[in-house]
Image (spheres, rainbow, N blue to C red):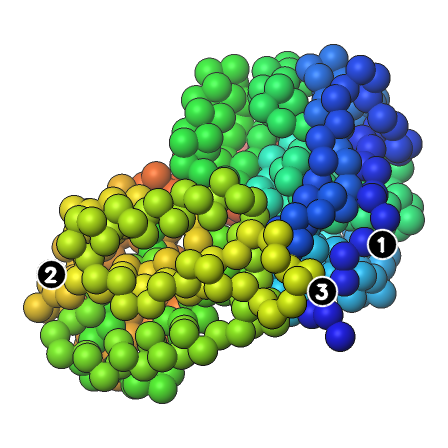
Amino acid sequence: MSFVELPESVVPCRNLVGGEWQLPQGSPLLDVRSPYTGTVIGRVPLTSAAGVSQVVEAARSAADSWAATPLRERTQLLFRFRHLLEQNLARLANLAASEAGKTVAEARAGLLKGIEVCEFALSLQNLDSGAHMEVSRGVTCELRREPLGVVAGITPFNFPAMVPMWMFPIAVTLGNVFIHKPSEKVPLTACVLGELMREAGYPAGVFSIVHGGKEAVDALVAHPDVKALAFVGSSAVARHLYAEGSKRGKRVLALGGAKNHLIVAPDADPELTAQAVVDSFTGCAGQRCMAGSVVLAVGNVESLLADIVRRAGGIEMGPGMGAIIDKGAVERLETAIDQASSEGAKLVLDGRGRRPKGDAWAQGNWLGPSILDHVRPDMEAARRELFGPVLSIIRVPTLSAALAVENASSYGNAASIFTTSGVVAQTVVEGVRAGMVGVNVGVPVPREPFSFGGTGESRFGHGDITGPSGLDFWTQLKKVTRKWSARTDGSWMS
C-alpha cells in the first residue's frame, strides 16, 4: 500500500471570483507536479493583473454587506466550515501531501493546527466585545473594532492549508472579505478550501482565490482596494512586499525565513533531546520556517550527537520523511552541502541519493537527512536558510558562546534550549532575541491563543499573525465619545 495517494487525473484549478469558479481569460497554464513522483497532478492559471482586478472588484462588492452582518451570524458560518474541515480531513491531508511533498501525517497535523485557529476565531463572539465606560460625569467612551474591507493573504508551498488558515478564519469572522493567493506550486488544496467555504454558506465574494505567480502578487500589492496584506515566505520577498505595500499606505505583515538554533547543554536529557532534534530538522523534510537547522553543541555532548546521526540515518524515506518541493530545491541543497564540505565542515550523514524503494518514486525530488559537523559560524551553511533536511552542528565551549552565535543571526524566528536545569533554561529564554523560544521543545510553535511570529529578518511589520495580534492586524479601532445632556457638576470634559 502506498504511503500517499496521488490524484487519479490532472486536476484543473480555477479562480474563485464572486462565488464562482472561473478560468481567467488569456492566462497561461502551469503544470503542478507532485514532489513524490514528478508527475503532473494539476494545472493552474497564472492570472494577469487584469484578472486580479476582477477578483478584487468582486470581493469589494461584497465588503459592505459582509461588514454589516452581525458577528454571531458570521461565526455560525465558520462553525459549518470547521465541521466540513473535519469531515474532509483525510481527503485534504492526502491532497496537501501529494502536492507539497510532506507526509500525510504532517499534512494532517497542519490541518489540525488550522482548525485550532478556526476555534480561536469562533471564540471572538464571546471574547471580543470591545469596551464601554463612563469616563466622566455624563460622558461615555466606547471602543469599536471594525473591519478593513478587502484584505489578502499570500501563502507558501510548504503548508497549503495551515498557513492560509492562520489568516482567513480570523479575517472574515472580523468582517473582512478575503482574497487568497496560494503558491502556484500547491494550488489544489486551496481550491478544496474554497469549495468548503462555499459549501459552508459564505456569501459570494467573501472568500476569493486568485492563482498565479509574481504578476498576480504585484497586482494585489498595487491594487488600491486591497487594504491589508499578510504574507509568509522567504525574507527577501517579505522585505520587498512590506516595502511596496507600506509605501502605498497598506497594512502589511510579512513573515520571512529563519535560521533556528537548537542549543544542547551537557546536562540535556539524551532520549528527549536526540529525538526532538531529529524531528525538528527532518519534519516536513526541513521545509518549514520552524525547522531547527543548527545545533549549538555546548561542551562535551559527543554521545548525544552520535545518537542524532544514528536516528536521522534510520528514517525511512517516504513514510518517515517526504519529498523536496522541486528539483531546483534539491540541486540548491546539494550545492550547499558541497560548499560546506569544501569550507571544512565534516559530512557525517549524507542523504544525497536516498529515496523510497520502488520505481514509482524514481523521478521524485528526494534528499535524505544530512548532517554537517564542525561547521563554523561564518560558513554559509550556518548563516543562510537552506530550507531542507540539512543540520549544521556548531561546537561552542560555553552557553554564553551559544547565545552569541544565536543572537548574531539576522533572523529571529525561533530558538530552543535542551537542558535539565531551570537556571540554564531561564538564561536562554531571557538571553535570545528570537520571537519564539522552546525549552526541551524542538519546534516551539505556540498553540492558540498564543500568537505566531518572529523578529529581525523573520518578520517585516508589526505584531504576529495569529491569536490576539491577528485581531489587531485585520481590524481598525474606532473610538466613540458620547454626551447627551449638559451637567451642572463640571469635569475636565465639560
Badge 1: few (under 14), some or many (20 or more) residues near its Cα, within 10 Å? few
**Residue nearest the viewer, comparing 247 with 325:** 325
Quadrant housing residue 171: top right
User: What's under tag 2, amino acid-wise?
Assistant: Ala
The residue at 81%/54% (across/down) is 7
Badge 2: few (under 14), some or many (20 or more) residues near its Cα, within 10 Å? some
The residue tagged with tag 1: helix, strand or loop?
loop
C-alpha span from label 2 to label 1: 53 Å
The tag on residue 8 is: 1
C-alpha span from label 1 to label 3: 12 Å
Which residue matches tag 2? 401
Vertical position of residue 58 compared to residue 478: above or below:
above
Q: Quadrant of the N terminus?
A: bottom right
Instruction: Pick whichever of labels 2 and 1 is earlier in the sequence.
Output: 1
Vertical position of residue 323 compared to residue 485: above or below:
below
The residue tagged with tag 3: helix, strand or loop?
loop
Q: Position of residue 343 (x, y in %)?
A: 17, 49
Quadrant housing residue 11: top right
The residue tagged with tag 2: helix, strand or loop?
helix
Which residue matches tag 3? 4
Quadrant housing residue 485: top right
User: What's under tag 3, amino acid-wise?
Assistant: Val
The residue at 80%/61% (across/down) is 91
Instruction: Pick whichever of labels 3 and 2 is earlier in the sequence.
Output: 3
The residue at 59%/45% (across/down) is 157
Vertical position of residue 28 compared to residue 403: above or below:
above
**Residue nearest the viewer, comparing 237 with 471:** 237
User: What's under tag 1, amino acid-wise?
Assistant: Glu
Vertical position of residue 309 compared to residue 460: above or below:
below
Label 3 with label 2: CB-CB less than 8 Å: no
